[in-house]
Image: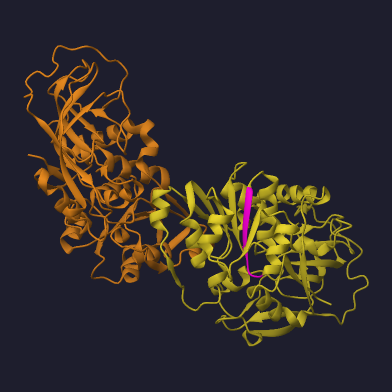
Chain colours: A orange, B yellow
Amino acid sequence: MFKKLVSGVHNTTRFYSGVSPKIKSRKYVLTKYFQGEPKKSDFQLVEEEIPELKDGEILTEAEYLSVDPYMRAYMIGYKLPTDMIGGQVAKIIASRNNEYPVGKYVCGSFGWRTHTVINPVQRTTGLLPLTLLPDISPYPISIALGILGMPGNTAYFGLKEICQPKPGETIVITGAAGAVGSHVGQIGKLMGCRVVGFAGTDEKCKYLEQELGFDRAFNYKTVDIKSALKEGAPKRVDCYFDNVGGEISSTIINYMNKYGRVAVCGSISSYNDAKLPKVTILQPAVVLKELKMEGFLVNRWTDRWDEGINANLIWLREGKLKYQEKIYYGFDNMVEALVGILRGENTGKAVVKVN
Amino acid sequence: MFKKLVSGVHNTTRFYSGVSPKIKSRKYVLTKYFQGEPKKSDFQLVEEEIPELKDGEILTEAEYLSVDPYMRAYMIGYKLPTDMIGGQVAKIIASRNNEYPVGKYVCGSFGWRTHTVINPVQRTTGLLPLTLLPDISPYPISIALGILGMPGNTAYFGLKEICQPKPGETIVITGAAGAVGSHVGQIGKLMGCRVVGFAGTDEKCKYLEQELGFDRAFNYKTVDIKSALKEGAPKRVDCYFDNVGGEISSTIINYMNKYGRVAVCGSISSYNDAKLPKVTILQPAVVLKELKMEGFLVNRWTDRWDEGINANLIWLREGKLKYQEKIYYGFDNMVEALVGILRGENTGKAVVKVN
């Protein structure tokens, strides 16, 4: 449904049409590695001239920027200073590429910046292939960063390919009210599984059970995890979709059935820690139960990107998938938004509306 | 090469020939769950009458009993009192089964007992299929409990199927001087990999490097693990064969390459602990490196048992595999032997010569 990066590049007369030559791009440059929670002082806000478009290039203006937990974890892999990474939905405001006309929207890993000049043929770095957004009305374009984007495909492929759940099995999800977790649970129900979620507030749990159809959801901050598992997963756990790491994951993994599968999608509980924490050892359970545990990044399925997007869009249109968005406002508030999701402020996908 | 359990059962006139009717079987019955190191007082030594053989049955007398780390971990899964589990090589001393004549040897999961009446058609419990031993001269029959038995197949299938090493990759092994670890390393070298082992004495390390061809071996009790990895595995770690669990495993797993594979074979470092210990969390590395970690018990390859035995026997006869045995003596010393291997007394496979 989403049009993937194609190779045809054409001249166009729409070059720079309607764009003020005085426009400048603003971007976040990371100048200090995060310590604990990200801080505004870890970044420099930089203004850049926008270069003239070359043949085949487009100029985009960001409408929604994504904030995701992985941003906290990944920057350690970059040499500083470096442009901040991330996905965005952006409007094409100038184009020298007929396949990407002005007025259309693209989704790409352009980072935390307001304006981007790019040749769509050029492979972007980061998790997202550059895609031209089709008409997804009546849904807002922002969901191309959520249920119809990277988190949606993370849920779709991670659950199907790593957990490989069978009907009747029990799936447990941590970070269950987040963009990925809430989506995983709904796909789990569509696949005929019992779905149990752990989230951080009673309100989130109520949403998971009453709106999204989770069989049970527990507030991990107030329950005893083992007791919750006994109650919520009476046949123990076949699939565990791990978004958080930490001690709760050890407890769940030690409560799994023979040949259980663990999809390790994230480890948000330790992203802010300077030193990796210690948790109860996994190996005895992994051996005795012959568990399989696999970490994954969604870009391993770049070749099958459209499959996930289309499956999710069909379920969405059929009313089988629901979503919720937490919208932060203003390009200047990117750091607050990132800190917010690391604190668990969001239910569903968090995005920043740039203007 | 080893003859697997077959269905043909025949009358035989050799029934009870040459066996004193006064012979009794002795066995270990576990009456208390282990706490810390196994103790003699956790068992009762019980004498049993040997029943008359029925058609198809054989009577065996144990010559070698196996002691393996898994014995410390598994008994928690049994209701007490229960016969102690384990493999043995035993001589057929009476037979009503033509395919299993007196004088031949079998290998089976008969437990810690001197005499066993069994119909070979009957599936035995435990890790080992019942096998009739072929002529493996000039090698001692005890190696049917080691390099040509359960540990040999654990090494063969665990490395090939779970780690799936490619030539030029680096394999790290903990418990490297044990029955399984020392075998894994040699297969790793045969597969064209760099092999690095961790063991518990300088003597073991010398043996691994000088006799078995490990590229490097380190005494985990005296080195800094991270420094040893930097030195021994300059291209980091692609495959980790984990026999021990514990903090050393966290350090190794955090030093792996993208798409690394971890075969979790055992967790001997925590078997004696009353409570599962805490170790550095694995999830951040598992996600970022997209690692695959899988626990296994060797009996999942029962259908391919002969493949492993034959491959190891061929390598052995070609001089490509070496082994070492630690022999304890006396049926009364089973507990001392088990404690011994849990303390790391053995290099290679430990067995108990019954008489």
Name the image quarter holding the C terminus of chain B: bottom right
Position of residue A8 in the picture relative to residue B252 (left or right): left
Q: Nearer the viewer, residue B265 or B324?
A: B324
Task: Give the main secondary structure of the magenta stretch.
Answer: strand
Q: Residue furthest bottom?
A: B41
Q: Where does residue B118 sit, x and y in percent of width and height?
A: 76, 66
Residue plotted at (32% across, 35% down):
A125
Quarter of the image where one finds residue A145: top left
Position of residue A264 in the picture relative to residue B44 (left or right): left
Q: Nearer the viewer, residue A125 or A76?
A: A76
Residue plotted at (38% across, 48% down):
A167
Q: Where does residue A90 sit, x and y in percent of width and height?
A: 16, 32
Quarter of the image where one finds residue A26: top left
Q: Nearer the viewer, residue A76 or A292?
A: A76
Q: Where does residue A81 sit, x and y in percent of width and height?
A: 27, 45
Q: Where does residue A350 sit, x and y in percent of width and height?
A: 17, 47
Residue B195 counted in the magenta span:
yes
Report the magenta residues as a range. Answer: B194-201
Quarter of the image where one finds residue A150: top left
Residue A178 counted in the magenta span:
no
